[in-house]
Each structure stands twice: as C-alpha cells, then as structure tokens.
Amino acid sequence: MSEMPVLQVEELSGGYSLGRPVLHDIQFDVQPGEMVGLIGLNGAGKSTTMKHILGLMTPHRGGVVIQGKTRDEEPETYQSSLAFVPESPLLYEELTVREHLEFAARAYNVGQEDYAQRSERLLKLFHMEEKADSLSMHLSKGMKQKVMIMCAFVARPPLYIIDEPFLGLDPLGIRSLLDFMLEMKESGSSILLSSHILSTIENYCDRFIVLHKGRVIAQGTLTDIAEQARMPGASLENMFYALVKDKE
Ligand SMILES: Nc1ncnc2c1ncn2[C@@H]1O[C@H](COP(=O)(O)OP(=O)(O)OP(=O)(O)O)[C@@H](O)[C@H]1O
C-alpha cells in the first residue's frame, strides 16, 4: 500500500487578483522522504505556488492538502506540519542568532533537550558558533540566510518548503545545506525546493516539477523528464532549456 503524500497540490489555480490567474491547474504531490525540485524561469510561478502552499494566498480553484488535511479543516496541524525558508532572509534585527533559534523551537513546541542538541549541531554545521550571540543586524547576508535555514531545521516538521536557498551562501554553506537536506530526507522528511541552480539540484532531488507561465509543463524523475524532453542522458539544464524553448 502506498503512503499518503505529505503534500498534494490539486488542480490549483490562483494569483494576486481574481480576474488574472497566475497559476493554472497546478497538480503535483510530494511523498514522505522525497526531495522535489520546483524549477522554472523568473516569473514562472514558483514563489506564488509556495505562497498558496503556505496558506498566504487563497486559491481561485483547487487547493492544497498537507498530510491529508486542508488548512481550513485543521489550521494548526497544517501550519505546524511545514517550515518555510524564504528567498530573502526576514529576521528580527534586535534578536541574536540563538534567540531566533529559541523562538522557532518554541513556535514548533520543540522540547528543551531536542532544541539544545539540534541548535548546537546546526550552529556547528553552518559554521555559525562564533556568531550565536550576535544580533542579526550585525550578520552578513549569507549568515542571515543561514539563520533562516537553521530556524526551519530546528523545528523538524514533516515538510520543508525552501525557496531558492543557495543565493548568498558560500560553497561550504551550500554543501552543508545539501548534506543536511539529504539527512532530513533519509529520516523521512519531505522537501519542496525551488532553485535556478539546476546543476546543483540535479543530483539531489528525487523528482522535478517544471513550471512555465504558471503551468506544469513536465514532471517526474530525471529519466521521466528526459523522456518528455526527448533528450535521453541530457543534463537537467539542457532538458529544461529545450522544454521551455519549445513552449515559447
Ligand atoms: N505581489 C504580486 N502582485 C502581483 N503579481 C505578482 C506578485 N508577485 C508575483 N507576481 C506575478 O506572478 C507571476 C509569478 O511570479 P512568481 O514570483 O511566482 O515567480 P517565480 O517563479 O517565483 O520567479 P523568480 O524565479 O523570479 O523568483 C509573475 O508574472 C509575477 O509578475
């Protein structure tokens, strides 16, 4: 028997005003322990899809189900099932790195012992131990991004929604993030990840959703996408380029 998907996006149409939908009939799911890449050109609809999943926007049609429930059915369970890493860091300037982690842990009801273990591990992994007691306004751009990432991972929800996390991270930070995402995945968590760095995510994601002008134009494993693009053995970047060019 197959497991229930962690995330189901069902015939989702939506956008910023009723008369002008940006997303058209988006349909995909994410299974437990899967890392799925959401890819598309600037303006394809990746962030808008994520905003609908987060419950920040109301669908025009269709909807989003997380662990079998919509946000209307069980708002608290829905919200506590996911953690979001936005494209641009949003931090409280007057809080330290550690205070941000404590805040995230409290919001997700993480016990003291788990919090202590997870936060020390994350600070070490992202080379942020020396900055743990610095105010966020005194951090570099990449360090701020690391705080957002660490806050999501201290929570350990079943589903991570991660929007273009690599920009601003140094090569060590990128590697730490990729390795940690793999570890989360192996422990059963699911990740929906958007990125333009196709060569980086190519070998990490189990499946890909290709969005173009608010529609899913291809989805599946690398092999599935290669079939859809009729380019066996090609790189994700070359297949993506061919798929998108075909729709212009
Ligand atoms: N706040 C907004 N109000 C109105 N339209 C918006 C808003 N944000 C995005 N859009 C429009 O929605 C469409 C999809 O944008 P979205 O931000 O989802 O793209 P994206 O795939 O995340 O792009 P990028 O790779 O540049 O981050 C675009 O046409 C964009 O102009």
Image: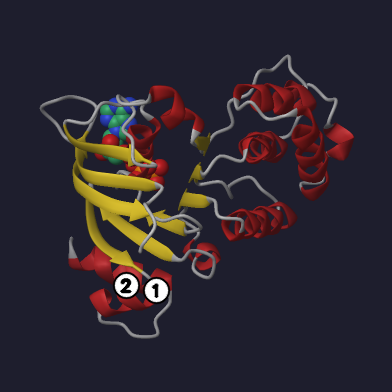
Q: Does the residue labelled 2 lie within 8 Å of ligand 1?
A: no
Residue at the outermost left position: 19
Circle 1: residue type: Leu
Residue at the outermost top position: 94
Residue identifier under label 2 = 225
Q: Is residue 11 above or below residue 73?
A: below
Q: Residue 181 carries which label?
A: none
Residue 235 location, quadrant: bottom left
Residue at the outermost right position: 130
Q: Nearer the viewer, residue 246 or 147?
A: 147
Residue 143 location, quadrant: top right
Q: Which of 65 and 16 is in front in this view?
A: 65
Q: Which of 113 and 179 is in front in this view?
A: 113
Circle 2: residue type: Ile
In the rendered structure, the answer to whether residue 118 lies left or right of residue 57 reads: right
Residue identifier under label 1 = 222
The local secondary structure at tag 2 comes to: helix
Decide: marks 2, 1 in contact (CB < 8 A)? Answer: yes
Q: Residue at x 33, y 35 (%)?
A: 69
